[in-house]
């Protein structure tokens, strides 16, 4: 009987899938490095969520053949080290794309309508807020998407066809194809400079970490909004705070941060910023799909099949 470790619990769909196929599961352990190293030692597969998995966690494992990511991003796993050891890393890139896209649209609408400020002032019984509201309709405004993958395309569709926004997507790929009402640009400065909203939909890589620093944020259109539900290390927090406090940007909506959970930050004091808890990809539907897709990926590797969604391609066999 092959063993699969699930340090952070997942929805029933994935666990049932594996149990029905005869796997032994261990669910719910501490995710500190020492505990993980010990528990991974004799398992065949690993399903991971948000904890970090550097090389030292799995380098002494005797049987580990696959690390399946519950969700999309694999930046919390040392993918290269796993590949060199013959360990597959797989994910489920389609599991929560609609959930994140819907959340992004909600962030755009909440920012534009000033819902957070209206709520705060109304609870404080301050009815003068409505007298100074300056709000433009989203119809005809411009949304700039940084990244045009699965999520970016869904956001583009919902914004252009549902809200009648103009959408420009920055994509470095030369073969990008847009949908009706969406323009593709390979000029980042152009997209930043003409968009009323900028939303990030790019992965965390060596070239994108810290990408949105003070200089790049200042290339955004004055009075525009910054939205990030992708990865927390794509922007420099102190630089974003600076442009917000200067009044250069009108506001921001953030779901991800360099340090999570967010505890000590000036972001917590800014009324023009909407903050959430890395939950953009969480819905009842997405939780079931993320769980199932991770289980399917683990099973594919452990039964000798080519994984549908590989994040690496080991050339050595365990």
Image (cartoon, rainbow, N blue to C red):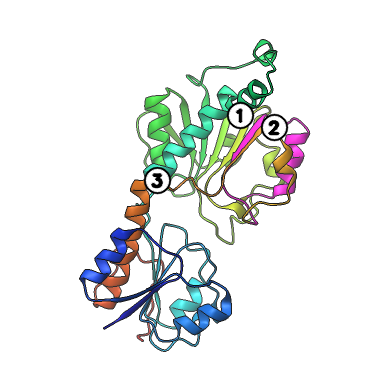
Direction from residue 214 to residue 18 in the image, left or right: left
How far from the left and from the top, in percent, is residue 299?
27, 71
Which residue is pictured at 39% across the width and 61% down the height?
10
| Residue 244 within the segment the image draws in magenta | yes
Mark 1: few, some, or many residues within 10 Å (few <14, many ≥20)? some
How far apart are the two marked residues, 1 and 2, measured between alpha carbons? 8 Å
Between residue 291 and residue 243, name the one nearer to us: 291
* Mark 3 nearby-residue class (10 Å; few <14, some 14–19, many ≥20): some
Q: Which mark is residue 131?
A: none
Residue located beneath label 2 in the image: 271
Classify 10 Å Cα crowding around label 2: few (below 14), some (14-19), many (20 and above).
Answer: few
Boundaries of the magenta span? 235-259
Question: Circle 3 sits in a helix, a strand or a loop, which is it?
Answer: loop
Q: Check contact, mark 1 vs mark 2: CB within 8 A.
A: yes
Q: CA distance from mark 3 to mark 1?
A: 22 Å
Q: Residue at x 58, y 49 (%)?
A: 256
Residue under the image location 73 percent in, 31 percent down: 248
Badge number at residue 283: 3
Picture quadrant of residue 119: top right
The residue pinned by badge 1 equals 116
Please say if 204 is above or below 243. Answer: below
């Amino acid at each position: 009987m092959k063993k699969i470790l699930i340090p952070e619990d997942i929805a029933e769909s994935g666990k049932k899938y594996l149990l029905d196929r005869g796997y032994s599961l261990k669910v719910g352990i501490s995710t500190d490095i020492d505990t993980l190293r010990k528990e991974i030692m004799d398992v065949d597969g690993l399903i991971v969520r948000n904890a970090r998995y550097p090389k030292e966690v799995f380098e002494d494992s005797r049987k580990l053949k696959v690390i399946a990511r519950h969700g999309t991003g694999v930046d919390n796993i040392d993918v290269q080290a796993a590949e060199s050891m013959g360990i597959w890393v797989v994910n489920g890139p389609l599991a929560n794309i609609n959930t994140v896209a819907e959340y992004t649209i909600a962030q755009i609408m909440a920012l534009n309508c000033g819902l957070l400020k209206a709520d705060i002032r109304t609870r404080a019984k301050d009815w003068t807020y409505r007298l100074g509201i300056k709000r433009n309709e989203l119809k005809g405004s411009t949304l700039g998407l940084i990244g045009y993958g699965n999520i970016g395309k869904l956001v583009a569709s919902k914004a252009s066809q549902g809200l009648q926004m103009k959408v420009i997507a920055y994509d470095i790929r030369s073969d990008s194809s847009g949908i009706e009402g969406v323009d593709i640009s390979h000029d980042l400065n152009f997209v930043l400079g003409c968009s009323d909203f900028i939303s990030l939909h790019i992965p965390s890589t060596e070239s994108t970490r810290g990408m949105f620093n003070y200089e790049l944020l200042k290339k955004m259109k004055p009075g525009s909004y910054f939205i990030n539900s992708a990865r927390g290390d794509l922007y420099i927090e102190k630089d974003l705070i600076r442009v917000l406090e200067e009044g250069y940007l009108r506001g921001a909506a953030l779901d991800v941060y360099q340090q999570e959970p967010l505890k000590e930050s000036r972001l917590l004091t800014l009324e023009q910023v909407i903050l959430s808890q890395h939950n953009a990809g969480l819905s009842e539907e997405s939780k079931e799909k993320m769980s199932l897709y991770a289980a399917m990926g683990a099973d594919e590797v452990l039964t000798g099949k080519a994984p549908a969604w590989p994040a690496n391609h080991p050339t050595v066999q365990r």
